[in-house]
Image (cartoon, rainbow, N blue to C red):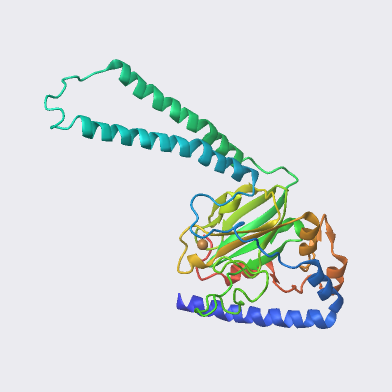
């Protein structure tokens, strides 16, 4: 364990060195590209109360996907009224029995043991209630797991102890490593990562990351989810999304975000000491801005076309800032090997 940690910090240190060397060489060799990249993409500032928990909030977060709106509708309009009516009805029955039929109020108890009419009602009625719940529930499950259309963009999500990596195989196969930002005045969680609040676009502490998972808005996205070490779970409440990340297995679901914005989530499967420090930040952008973001990565490809600026300025073997080769995420994972 300890040797694994040392190895990890050494590799992190080496990575930080490599990254700073890369950024120096990028700026020295190709100031035009650096400016283009900076002009092409600035992280979006999240909107307070959107895609994040609210103070003393009850119930679901506001939903920003069609499936989420449907799921929240089932919860709010179908399930909650049924639950409320049943609870109030049973409570009223209990109170009535306790008051009307206690030993003082009703000293001579009735000898009745059957009432066919009531028995039929209390059998049939729950069956109809359950059917009424089952129909939209099964419909929701079916819709949630409907496969993505062939043309959908694929993004590969990998859970690691304790960060996420996002691979973009359709956009040149670059990979983004996403670490939680450190908390001011508190022990460092991730070495070499800045503190939350140090950039104007930072969202809530514990939820904001250095590199977000950027996605195009209004398009189906095929999320393929796996893990490199132990079981994690990719969960974003405001997008109605939760799927386990299991080593050696790919779980797939469609993500479709209806509105541009930043949506936060957290790993939702106990995965070790820093389980609480691997948040998820999804930034949904219009297609042109998403394309501009892709082009800030070395080897970024849109519709099979490599960025001319990126291709000239940054040869394929030289990763841009915030980007590392695909195998680096695996090498950096702790000592637990896959399988
Ligand atoms: Cu986890």
User: Can you say whether 125 is above or below 211 in the image?
Assistant: above
The picture places residue 263, in percent across and down from the top left corner, at 62, 58
Q: Quadrant of residue 67?
A: top right
Left or right, residue 335 beside residue 250: left
The picture places residue 274, in percent across and down from the top left corner, at 48, 69
Please state which of residues 63 and 298 is positioned toward the viewer in this rendering: 63
The picture places residue 142, in percent across and down from the top left corner, at 58, 37
Residue projecting furthest to the top: 116
Q: Where does the N terminus fall, quadrant-wise?
A: bottom left
User: Can you say whether 76 is above or below 52 in the image?
Assistant: above
Residue depicted at 76% across the width and 83% down the height: 24
Left or right, residue 322 beside residue 311: left
The picture places residue 150, in percent across and down from the top left corner, at 73, 43
Q: Quadrant of residue 211?
A: bottom right
Residue depicted at 76% across the width and 74% down the height: 318
Left or right, residue 98 beside residue 143: left
Please state which of residues 304 and 90 is positioned toward the viewer in this rendering: 90
Count of residue discs: 0
């Amino acid at each position: 364990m300890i040797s694994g940690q040392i190895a990890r910090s050494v590799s992190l240190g080496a990575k930080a060195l490599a990254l700073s060397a890369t950024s120096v060489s990028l700026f020295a060799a190709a100031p035009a590209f650096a400016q283009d990249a900076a002009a092409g993409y600035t992280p979006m500032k999240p909107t307070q109360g959107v895609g994040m928990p609210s103070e003393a909030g009850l119930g679901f977060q506001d939903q920003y996907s069609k499936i989420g709106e449907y799921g929240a509708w089932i919860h709010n309009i179908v399930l909650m009224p049924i639950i409320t009516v049943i609870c109030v009805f049973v409570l009223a029955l209990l109170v009535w029995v306790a008051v009307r039929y206690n030993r003082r109020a009703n000293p001579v108890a009735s000898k009745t043991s059957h009432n066919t009419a009531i028995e039929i009602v209390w059998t049939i009625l729950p069956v109809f209630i359950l059917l009424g719940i089952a129909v939209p529930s099964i419909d929701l499950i079916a819709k949630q797991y409907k496969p993505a259309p062939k043309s959908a963009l694929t993004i590969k999500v990998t859970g690691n102890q304790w960060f996420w990596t996002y691979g973009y195989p359709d956009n040149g196969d670059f990979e983004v490593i996403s670490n939680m930002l450190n908390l001011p005045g508190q022990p460092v969680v991730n070495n070499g990562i800045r503190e939350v609040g140090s950039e104007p676009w930072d969202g809530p502490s514990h939820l904001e990351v250095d590199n977000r998972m950027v996605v195009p808005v209004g398009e189906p996205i095929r999320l393929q989810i796996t893990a490199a070490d132990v079981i994690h779970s990719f969960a974003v409440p405001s997008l109605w999304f939760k799927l386990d990340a299991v080593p050696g297995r790919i779980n797939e679901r469609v993500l479709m975000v209806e509105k541009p914005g930043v949506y936060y989530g957290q790993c939702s499967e106990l995965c070790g000491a820093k389980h609480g420090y691997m948040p998820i930040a999804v930034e949904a952008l219009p297609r042109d801005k998403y394309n501009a973001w892709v082009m800030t990565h070395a080897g970024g490809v849109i519709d099979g076309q490599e960025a001319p600026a990126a291709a000239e300025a940054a040869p394929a073997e030289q990763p841009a800032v915030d980007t590392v080769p695909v195998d680096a995420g695996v090498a950096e994972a702790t000592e637990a090997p896959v399988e």
